[in-house]
Image: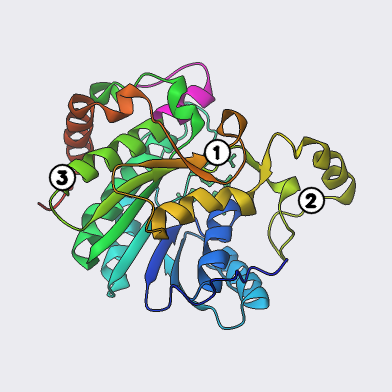
Amino acid sequence: MDSRPSHAHELVGRTILVTGANAGIGYWCVEKLAARGARVLLGCRSPERARTAVDAVVTHVPEADLRVIPVDLGSLDSIRSAAGEIGERLDAIICNAGVKTARPDARTADGFDLMIGTNFLGHFALLAQVASLLDDDARVVAVGSIAHRFARLDPDRLADPWRGSSLRQYGRSKAALMAFAVGLDRRWSGSALSALCAHPGYAVDPLTAPRPGLAQVPAPVRALAALSRPFVQGKDDGAAPLIHAATSPEAMSGEYWGPGGMLEFRGAPARVTASDEVRSPATGAALWAAAERMTGIRFPA
Ligand SMILES: NC(=O)c1ccc[n+]([C@@H]2O[C@H](COP(=O)([O-])OP(=O)(O)OC[C@H]3O[C@@H](n4cnc5c(N)ncnc54)[C@H](OP(=O)(O)O)[C@@H]3O)[C@@H](O)[C@H]2O)c1
């Protein structure tokens, strides 16, 4: 599949950081943004997997302008180093890196719950430390999930041990990241900076165009998965709402974009609605304070 769209090169001059860029939806954000001329910074924790992703992008977009930023979103030290290393102006950041399932005792390097620590606190810490690099009209895109509706978000209990469904804790971590973006939108009102949420719907590897070194799916699995195409989509298509939120003049600060099809599982990007809890100013403010307290990092005014 050729990633080159009809509007190739319209993003020349823009620099976009994508976290979790070496696999899945993050990879597809990189390939598609590079095909449109953007300079893309790949935030990845593994140099080997980052190299594989870069090689795959270049195979399809030979003129791609790419740079790898080593960053482990599960380590405040690593995030601090990455933020110090970037040293260039950013037009957008897609907060995509995510852990989707974990055991209750799984922890980040700093002792946070793995999903809350990586998906939310890691991106909070990254954004706080690269805020000075953002261009005047930069955009931040928080990658949410339909699962944000599956959990209550109690900002004062983010550090509490959890039991039961990993999906619920995942949903909580995604709700927290989304509420952070909603809070950023409020904080940035009156400026040209934008903060949005976006989600990829239900996006799976077997429906995704193959790329060398990325998720290898046996042909029989691919053939069987084709039957599910009316309901779900590939990660290549799942990247579309994220890219739309990061680049389209149509997408505005404070909005939430996802696939417009049935149950938001698949389809072209459309405006969707986040839960009341994610949009609540009180929850957002409490969450913000909790993130600063837990990470010890103050978000710059
Ligand atoms: N797929 C879906 O249907 C779906 C639905 C809703 C939301 N989402 C969200 O979309 C995003 C991407 O999902 P996906 O399906 O593409 O997942 P994926 O294929 O598992 O890719 C996840 C990416 O995040 C990276 N990552 C995980 N932990 C990290 C850390 N500590 N530091 C840096 N990078 C880290 C992974 O890097 P490694 O290779 O090093 O592990 C990988 O590049 C996630 O935020 C997910 O919650 C996905």
> Eyeballing the image, is 92 above or below 121?
below
Of callouts 2 and 3, the N-terminal one:
3
Q: Which residues are magenta?
A: 159-172
Q: Which mark is residue 177?
A: none
Residue extending furthest toward the top: 164
Which residue corresponds to mark 2?
217
58 vs 284, left or right, is right
Q: Residue at x 56, y 83 (%)?
A: 63
- Looking at the rendered structure, the kind of residue marked 2 is Val
Q: How is the image coloured?
A: rainbow
Which residue corresponds to mark 3?
187
Classed neighbour count for the residue bearing mark 2: other residues with Cα under 10 Å, few (<14), some (14–19), many (≥20)? some
Q: Is residue 216 visible?
A: yes
Classed neighbour count for the residue bearing mark 1: other residues with Cα under 10 Å, few (<14), some (14–19), many (≥20)? some
Residue extending furthest toward the right: 220
Q: Decide whether residue 166 is among the magenta residues.
A: yes
